[in-house]
Image: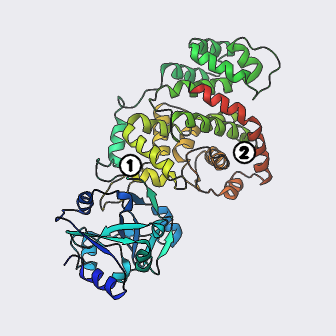
Amino acid sequence: MALAARLERFLNQQGIAYKELPIHRASSLDAAISQLGQSRQDVIRATLLIDISGIVMVVHRYDSTLDAEALRQLTGRHLQPLTAGQTMRLFSDCDPGFTPPIGNAYELPVLLDEGIAQAEQVVFSSGTDHSLVEMDARSLRLAMAGSREGKLAIRGPGNDGTREALTLAEVANKLKKLYRLPPMPALALRILRLTSNTEATARELAELIEFDPSLTAQVMRYARSALFNYPGQINSVQEAVTRVLGFDRVAHIALGIASVRAFDVPRAGMLGMDNFWRHSLYCAFLCQRLAPYCGADKGLAYLCGLLHNFGLLLVGHLFPAEFKELNRLREANPETSMQALEQQVFGQGNEQEIIAVGHGAIGGILHRLWELPDPVVKAAGVHQQPGYHGEHENYVMMVQLANALLKQKNIGDEFNPDDIPGLLHGLNLESAMIDELISETEQVAPELDALALSLTT
């Protein structure tokens, strides 16, 4: 028999046209697809999930991975994968590993990832290890009658078994090996130590910065930018400190610039260095503007915004292959949460529970090892956690609110919705503050863009 018995009976009874694609016996569905030599974009597959309310079949493209958060939002259910034993009992007429994605044949409710119903044709498992099924769009719609459609999957191959998945323990071990972690650059360390000295002077800071010609040029460019509209000439870093920027602001921007040199990360892509600097500078600007209204230190708020995303740079530095994949998935899935993408890239495959790593968490680890101020450590470590309450929560929420507002300008690595009213309430801010912040950001956007570009060239 070329098709599993229940699948064949269902298709014939419903008068649904299909084409059998005989193949040599295959050890897995992946091997079966490889025999055809056609694009995997045409192949769909089934993932079976269960909770106390029962079993659900999710049908999605073969080169995609389910988005657990999207599933939870669509269904309101906390679904878990079926075990191999449960699957075999349910699909007793099928060969192991060859589950057909036609839930109606097995009386299962189906969730269908968006776009599949509009495909001109699809290929999928027949339930046997020696054939596949090809079906056109009309037949597929008939076969999927009654299914519920939604955006349920992350596009892209992800962890498809071609490389070993990184577990949380493996990442932790790599982070604990200090020789693998980039140390804080010497100049950044000297700036950090200087800022911790309450008696440090503008002259000492200027002399330290002027030790590095590139950093000097960048600080001077910053001070001369239209962000500050200083009417006179600025001829030295010390003048930039005393006349325009102030000690803390110069120290923090210099610390950020010097620290980034620890990382070897590509410039291109949504997560590359170009967009990192743009995002960081915008976030720092907004956090500094929010600070007086939130009982926070302006300098620390600026530093929290500037350094909160260093975890992404650490990912790119330590795990270049995974970072490249994460960058590709971010561009292919603009509406998917960053946490979901990181779960796919930094997780366990097969039937094991996906383990999220999160660039925020490892960025916080790095900041702690570099002995940065506690609010900076906390803002980096938990900025991906909605509803955070705890130590330095005002700094965390300022970063979260700044990022939420920046999404409206397509700036940053997250584009899924935020609870802006909740963040305003947590920071004791009025909703009118939003319009004011957006207006101020738009006014300085050209200067921030120019500064970001200068920091990567």
Q: Is residue 446 above or below residue 439?
A: above
Q: Residue at x 68, y 40 (%)?
A: 287
Residue 292, relative to residue 221: is it above or below?
A: below
- The mark closer to the camera, 1 or 2, is 1
For the N terminus, which image quadrant?
bottom left
What residue sits 36% from the left and 43% below the top? 171
Left or right, 5 with respect to 278, comes to left
Q: Are marks 1 and 2 in contact (CB under 8 Å)?
A: no
**The residue tagged with tag 2: helix, strand or loop?**
loop
Q: Nearer the viewer, residue 275 or 387?
A: 275
**Can residue 426 be seen in the rendering of this structure?**
yes
Q: Could you say which quadrant of the image residue 191 lies in?
A: top right
Residue 242 image point, x, y percent: 74, 18
- What residue is drawn where x is 77% and y is 18%? 243
Camera-nearest residue between 122 and 223: 122
Q: Residue furthest bottom?
A: 13
Give amino acid for label 1: Phe
For the question of whether residue 304 can be seen, the reply is no
Q: Which residue is mark 2?
A: 294
Q: Quadrant of the C terminus?
A: top right
Q: Earlier in the sequence, mark 1 or mark 2?
A: 2
Location of residue 211 in the rendering, given as x and y in whole percent from the top left corner: 57, 11
Label 1: which secondary element: loop
User: What's the distance in space between the residues labelled 1 and 2, CA to CA?
Assistant: 35 Å
Location of mark 1 (residue) = 346
